Image (spheres, rainbow, N blue to C red):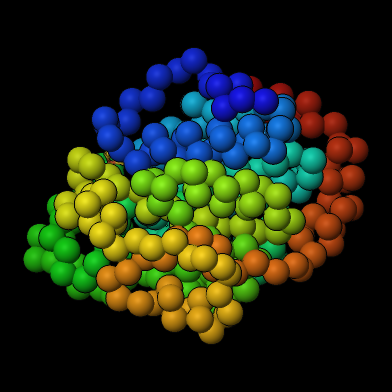
Amino acid sequence: MKPLTYNTGKIPVWCPGCGNFAIWNSIKKALASLELEPQKIALVSGIGCSGKMVNHVRSYAFHALHGRTLPVATGVKLANPELNVIVNGGDGDGYGMGVGHLIHAIRRNINVTYIVHHNKVYGLTTGQAAPTAVEGTISKSTPFGVVDAQINPLVLAMANGATYVARGYSGESEQLAELIAGGIQHKGFAIIDVLQPCVTFGGDYKYDYYDERTEKLTEMPSPEKAIALATEPDKYYLGLYSKYDRPSYDERHPEISTEIKAKDVSKLIESFI
Ligand code: SF4
């Protein structure tokens, strides 16, 4: 299988230089490395520039409401556990309005791979501050500077028991492909927070900023060290922070998919037409 296998023929409309291109390529590389056939993959995305990913990867796809990717992905996985469910969303989508869903997906250990495009802004709506924005950042929604503290997604995920936690960077697409492949292979909830420069509305947080502040982890750190690394100011370590085994929700509740498969869903579909 080659990365080209997963092209849909649609040309992305992301701004030239957007970090989303590298994430797109890394997803395709990861899928090719795992030899996954398109019909074994379901992509779910939220609203935002990242949400367009469903248009560009050959697979089943669902473009969900803003902040609601994980409930949809949960439904897809429980209905058909044989699908590899990959979720794409922005940091506003996932750490803002969707953060409650994130915590519950973590505690249930839903077996999906969640790729969060971390660019510190709402790019599609032209640059409002996301929950990852640095305190003091001037943006369209914060003309006097962000007054709230940043969400730290890695700490949030690890503290709540996520079974696979990683950080990637659009500027390191080979490593990112490996982290995504690792997340897909992991049996449980995998979150990969990806530093994705928004070159148009991202203010100071572009490639130069991250190139100067990123460093690859050489091995997975201990839990204590992982928290220390994730909270080091003005520094972004790239790699796998945490991984351990815990039965996933679909493993613990196989009866859910059996019940769904036994139902005649055609009537339900008709009711929507
Ligand atoms: Fe990428 Fe930002 Fe352009 Fe959206 S607005 S496509 S995130 S560079």
Image side of residue 108 versus residue 50, left or right: right
The structure residue drawn at horizontal position 44% and vertical position 61%, both measured from the top left corner, is 216
Determine the residue positioned at 87% across, 53% down: 254
Q: Where is residue 110 in the image (x, y as percent from the top left)?
A: 69, 57
Identify which residue is drawn at 61% across, 21% down.
5
> Could you tell me residue 271's position as x and y percent?
69, 28
Q: In which quarter of the image is residue 199?
A: top left
Q: Which of the pair 80/214 is nearer the observer?
A: 214
- In the current view of this chain or complex, which residue is farthest to the left? 144
- Which residue in the rendered view is the most extreme toward the front? 218
Locate residue 216 relative to residue 8 in the image: left or right.
Answer: left
Q: In which quarter of the image is the N terminus?
A: top right
Label total for image? 0
Q: Is residue 24 above or below residue 214?
A: above
Residue drawn at x 58%, y 69% is: 220
Query: In the rendering, at what x and y percent does residue 62 appear?
Result: 57, 34
Q: In this view, does 48 lie above or below 5?
A: below
Residue 202 appears left or right of 151: left
Residue 17 point in image, percent of width and height: 28, 35
Q: In this view, does 221 lie above or below 120?
A: below
Judge whether residue 114 can be spotted in this image: no
Q: In which quarter of the image is the C terminus?
A: top right
- Does residue 221 sit above or below 8 in this rendering? below
